[in-house]
Amino acid sequence: MDFRISTIDTTIVLVYVLATLFFGLWIGCGPQSLSRYMVGGRDLPWWVVLGSIIATETSAVTFLSVPGLAFVSDGNFGFLQLAIGLVIGRLIVVVWFLPSYFQGEEVFTAYDILRTRFGGLTQRAASAIFIVTRTVADGLRLYLTALVLGQVSGIDLTLCVLAIGVVTVVYAAVGGIRSVAWNDCIQLVVYLIGAIAAVVVIAGRLPDGLQSVVDFGRSTERFRLFEPSAFSFASANVWAGLIGGIFITLATHGTDQLMVQRYLCARGLRQARWAVGLSGPLVAIQFALFLLVGVALAAWVQGGGTLATDNRDEVFAAFIVDQMPVGLCGVTLAAVFSVAMSTLSSSLSSSSSAVVNDFLKPRYQADEDKNLDNGSLEDKSAKIDRRLTVAGKVATVVFGCLQMAVAIFVIQSPSLVAGSVVHQVITVAGFSSGLIVGIFFLGKTRRQYAQRSGLIGMFAALVVTSVLIFPPADAPWKVHGWWAAAIASCVCFAVASIVDRVFPDRKVIQ
C-alpha cells in the first residue's frame, strides 16, 4: 500500500492507535457492574471528568474544520462569539441543572428525571431523539476524520471509516465509561500537542515567526471577534453567538446524555460543578488555538506556500500530510485520531447507556417481577444488573456499526456536507437537544404539566425548527444554525404551556 507519509510517521500513528486500544482494555478490565459500566462507579476525580468533557466535545470536526473558518479569505475569529454564550451557558448549567442529577434516587441518564416529572413516555421520547440525532451527528464527524486517513494512505474512504470505528468500538464496548473517560484525558493532551506543534512549524517558515502570523491577522482583520452587523437571525452575529450559544450549551451540556453521563461519573455535585464550570473558559481558549492555526495557514499561503486543496474543512489536513516534518507529522496525525476516537467512544457509551436505562431496564425489571420463582430480591437485582451490563456492551457495538453506516452514506453523497461541517454538526446538536431543554424548563416550574402537553410541545418544536433551520430552496426566510437550540427550546415550552392550559388534564401517564 502506498502511504503518503514516512515510515516513521506511519509507525507513530499505528503505535498510538494500538496503545489507545490496549490502555482502554486495561482500564476496563476487572469485574463489571451496571454502575461501573455506565457511570464509572461514580468515583472518577473531577479533573478526569473535566478532561473527558473537553475531549468529548472536541471532535475531528473541531480540530480540522475550525481552523478553516479563519483560513478562508473572509475568515476571522467570529466563531468565538459562540464561545461567549457557551461559557455563560455552562454557568447556568452549574447552578440550575446539575443539582437535579444529584438529588433523590440514583440517576443513570439525563432523562431519568423526566420520567419522575412527566412519565415514562416522555423519558423514552427524549432518549430516542438523543439516540437518533447523536448517531447522525457523530456519523458526520467520523466521515470528516476518514477524509484525513484517506489523504494519508490513499485507502478507500469506506475502509478508513471501518479502521477508525472498529478500534474505538472494541475498547468502548469492553471497558465502558471508565475506559472512555481515562482515554479522553490522554487524547486531550495528544491533540493539544498536535495543534501547538502545527502553529510552531508554520511560524518557523515565516520571516518573523509568530510575529508574522500576528501582523497578517491584524492586517486582514482575521482577529476580529465581533461581526459589525445588527441583530439578525440569518447570520452568525454577536447576538446569535450570545443567545444561541447559551441555549446550545443548555442543550448539549445541561440535558444531553453525552455530557450528563460524565457528570454522573463524578464523586458528587461539587466535583461535577468544578468540572463543568472550568470546561467553558478552557474550551474557549482551545477554540482560539484552533482558529490561530487557520490564521497561520493563511499567512503561510500568502507568503508563497501551497496546499493540495482550498476546501476549508481539508486545508489543515492537507498541511499535516504534505508539510509537517517527519515525526511531527505522525504526532499531529495521532492527534486527529485521538479526537476522532474520543468523540466516537463517548457517543457510543452515552447512546448505549440511554438504550439500556431508558428502554431495556424497565422491561427487564418487569420480566423479573413476573417470575415468582426467581429467588430473593437481591438475586433478582444481581441478575438484572448482569443482563443489562451485557446488553450495554451489545448496544455499544450496534451503535458503532450504525455510525459507521452514516459516515459511509455521506461518502456516497458528499453534497450533503457542501457547507462547513462544523456548523452543520452544531446545528444538528442544538436542534435535537433544544427540544429536550424545553421539556426541562417545564419541569423546573411549579406547575404539574400533563405528559401529553410535553409531548405535543416536543413535536411542535420539531416541526417548527425543521422548517426554519432547513427551509425549502425558495423560502423567503433564512435562520442561522446557531439559533436552532433557542428556537426549539422556546417553541416546545410555549406550545406545551398553551396546550396544558387549554386542556388542563394533569394526570401523569406512566
Image: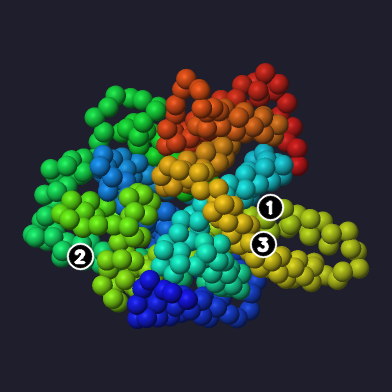
Give the Cα separation between the discs numbered 1 and 2.
47 Å
Task: Say which of marks 1 and 2 sits in front.
Answer: 2
The three-letter code of the residue at mark 3 reads Val
Say which residue label 1 marks: 358
- Percent position of residue 424, x then y: 46, 43
Q: Residue at x 43, y 74 (%)?
A: 2
Q: Residue at x 26, y 39 (%)?
A: 74
Give the Cα separation between the discs numbered 3 and 1.
17 Å
- Percent position of residue 301, x then y: 21, 54
Task: Say which of marks 3 and 1 sits in front.
Answer: 3
Q: Nearer the viewer, residue 143 or 238?
A: 143
The three-letter code of the residue at mark 2 reads Val
Q: Residue at x 29, y 57 (%)?
A: 307
Question: Pointer 1 and pointer 2: residues touching (CB < 8 Å)?
Answer: no
Q: Nearer the viewer, residue 64 or 278?
A: 64
The three-letter code of the residue at mark 1 reads Asp
Say which residue label 3 marks: 398
Mark 1, secondary structure of its residue: helix
- Percent position of residue 447, x then y: 61, 30
Say which residue label 2 marks: 200
